[in-house]
Amino acid sequence: MSAAPADKLEMLDRTMRLANVRHELEQRSFYYLAAAAEKDVPLRETTGPAEARRQLIDDVVATAPLAAHIVRGARIACPDIADNYSREGLVTCFRVHEVLRKTRRHPEARILLDDKPVARRELLAMYRLLTPNTNLEPLSPYTLYTLPRILAAGIIGGFVIGGWAGREQVPETWINLRAAYLGGGLVAGAMFLLGQFAWSRNLAKAAPWNVALYNDVNFTLYQRDPALLYLARAELIERNHLIKGGLNGRRYHERACAIETGAYVDVLKRRREQLLARGGAD
């Protein structure tokens, strides 16, 4: 008779814990939960951090639908995307990020999650539980920051500034070509930069594509060998150089594929050994 109340208490405890995890995901995301957990853990420790991360991902999978799709090996597809990597493959955080990024101008694009249609806004809401600092809302067709409108603004700005400068010079001319070229370039450059700030994430925080790769390391290790989850640390994951590597660069996709297949484990182990050899155990 005593087993039933004990079972009920255990179920209540689990329900409350999962509700708390869901709240934390909505407020902070999986990335911040995982990164905070590893913050004060020495690099040399293995068993304790791996078990703690496994328990965290257990709870995340139970509360975050996209995490459940990832660990189950579901697939995602978007026939409207041109490149092979993003068009179809296993559900990973990085691939979902690419699908969302490449459908910003076409939010009506057909997306299949586990062979079932999913609305882009629903996919974005699921993705944000795992990855913070995203700015992947659909782009309005009326935005000022499209390339044709930037060029048009540059041309108009160049004529206005060149005409004003021409009237000010002696002798007066209808347009000062040097001022027109310079002014047009400045107007176009300013609009381009404003567009980047309007469209992009918070530059002071972790880039979402780096976070997506970090998340994928966690979920892949959880799938393949949870005992290796001690390797899922941000400091062990390579990052592209700010200038040499971009989101469209080959290295990001190569890294994403290596994580997806499990080949990246060797890189994590090697980088851990290098840090430990340099005294990064504490």
Image: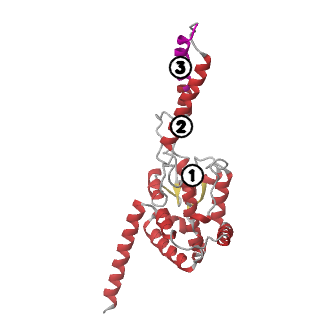
Mark seen at residue 64 = none
Cα separation between marks 2 and 3: 20 Å
On the question of residue 148 being in view, the answer is: no
Left or right: 36, with 176 as reference point: left
The amino acid type found where label 1 is placed reads: Glu
* Quadrant of the rendering where the N terminus is positioned: bottom left
On the question of residue 180 being in view, the answer is: yes
Q: Which residues are magenta?
A: 154-170
Q: Mark 2 highlights which residue? A: 193
Counting residues from the start of the chain, the first of labels 1 and 3 encountered is 1
Q: Position of residue 171 (x, y in %)?
A: 58, 6
Badge 2 element: helix
Badge 1 element: helix
Which picture quadrant has residue 235?
A: bottom right
Residue 12's place in the image compared with 93, above or below, is below
Badge 3 element: helix
Mark seen at residue 98 = 1
**Foreground disc of the pair 1, 3:** 3
Q: Residue at x 47, y 69 (%)?
A: 61
Q: Mark 3 highlights which residue? A: 161
Q: Position of residue 245 (x, y in %)?
A: 65, 50
Q: Nearer the viewer, residue 206 or 31?
A: 206
Counting residues from the start of the chain, the first of labels 2 and 3 encountered is 3
Which picture quadrant has residue 27?
A: bottom left
Q: Nearer the viewer, residue 218 or 242?
A: 242
Cα separation between marks 1 and 3: 40 Å
Q: Position of residue 2 (x, y in %)?
A: 31, 92
Q: Nearer the viewer, residue 219 or 82?
A: 219
Left or right: 165, with 125 as reference point: right
Q: Nearer the viewer, residue 275 or 98?
A: 275
